[in-house]
Image (tube, grey):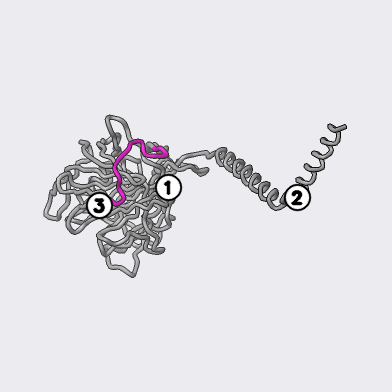
Amino acid sequence: MKNIVWFMATAVFMLILTACANPAEDESKQENQDKKENSVEETEQSKGTSYENIYPLTGEPTNDSVDHRVLSVMVNNHTDARPQTGLSQADIVYEVLAEGPITRFLALFHSQTPDVIGPVRSARPYYFKLAAGYDALYVYHGAASFINGMVHASGVDFANGALYDNDGKLFKRSTDREAPHNSYFLTSGVADLLANKGYETTKEVKPLPFADKPSSKGNNAKQVSVVYDERETVTYTYDAASEQYKRSSDGEPTVEKETGDRITVDNIFIVKTEHQVVDDAGRREIDLTSGGEGYLVQKGQIIEVKWENRNGRILPYKDGELVSFVPGQTWVNIVPDQSGIVTAE
């Protein structure tokens, strides 16, 4: 009898506790549980996302085809040519001294193709050699006759803006700048150019090495400066939120002309090599084959590397092993081995 009374009392007590429970608290717990389940489900869906291809020059996934030609364009970097158009969409930009203290860019486009790129400037031998390493269409505007001869003899596919000057199909002149700082390349004309010149429209582009995070531990590099000359200094400042570097030139932010958007990059590859001035115009010969010292800057850190030229491409090595880039855009600064100064902090 006592056991029955005790059991009934316990049951009544439990009913009272259940009745007194906080409905809002229960609802909150259920919402949290639902959020956790939804989060897990979203994560699993994200992990399950598959892409057909990887862009070979950025390491980023895509469902678009990746067998189209790489475009390489000589972009003017004279102070009268800044800001430029299209650089924010380049997969890779090579920055090299052209004459005097002034650098010039070879911008490679593959994952993105702007409608307009420029201003476009004249050819130099070491630039079209870099373009050849990617079997790219080499776009420039004019050159000395002997350099034009070298372009023709090299076998690289090319488009010389001097032959299409302001035709409105491949090149146009802007009215807000003076020549030679106002010639722009129109990419809408590329398909017709390739067809008319009998160039291949598709190419299998060999991918660069990529990894999701730096493969080697380096020193902190929140800001990196590359000094070409006392009149030409390039600075990269790390933005931890985006894990990218913002580029500046001579203390001025590098931006897109039309939008004002800041130029940012994921990899900075600094290559030190021999430079020789070879004529009164200040033209140079630059050693792109012998290998040498370099630096790779990624995600807030800098590591010392060695560079080697493999099949026309300059790549970073450490302890004999190829070092990977992180996915995204890359800027390659080629500097004189003696006077080129690199600082990081």
- Most extreme residue toward the right is 1
Q: CA distance from mark 2 to mark 3?
A: 67 Å
Neighbourhood count class around disc 3 (C-alpha, 10 Å): few under 14, some 14–19, many 20 upward: some
Residue 233 is situated, as x and y percent measured from the top left of the image, at: 23, 56
Q: Residue at x 28, y 29 (%)?
A: 320
Q: Give the camera-side residue of 103 and 280.
A: 103
Q: Which residue is mark 2?
A: 20
Dot 2: element: helix
Q: Tell me which amino acid carries mark 3.
A: Ser
Position of residue 26 in the picture relative to residue 76 (left or right): right
Q: Give the camera-side residue of 119 and 255.
A: 255
Neighbourhood count class around disc 2 (C-alpha, 10 Å): few under 14, some 14–19, many 20 upward: few
- Most extreme residue toward the left is 280
Q: Nearer the viewer, mark 1 or mark 3?
A: 3
Q: Earlier in the sequence, mark 1 or mark 3?
A: 1
Q: Tell me which amino acid carries mark 1.
A: Ala
Q: Name the dominant secondary structure of the magenta segment.
A: loop
Q: Are marks 1 and 2 in contact (CB under 8 Å)?
A: no
Q: CA distance from mark 1 to mark 3?
A: 43 Å
Q: Where does the magenta region start and end?
A: 210-225
Q: Which residue is mark 3?
A: 225
Above or below, 178 against 310 in this view is below
Q: Which mark is residue 195?
A: 1
Q: Quadrant of residue 58?
A: top left
Q: Tell me which amino acid carries mark 2.
A: Cys
Q: Earlier in the sequence, mark 1 or mark 2?
A: 2
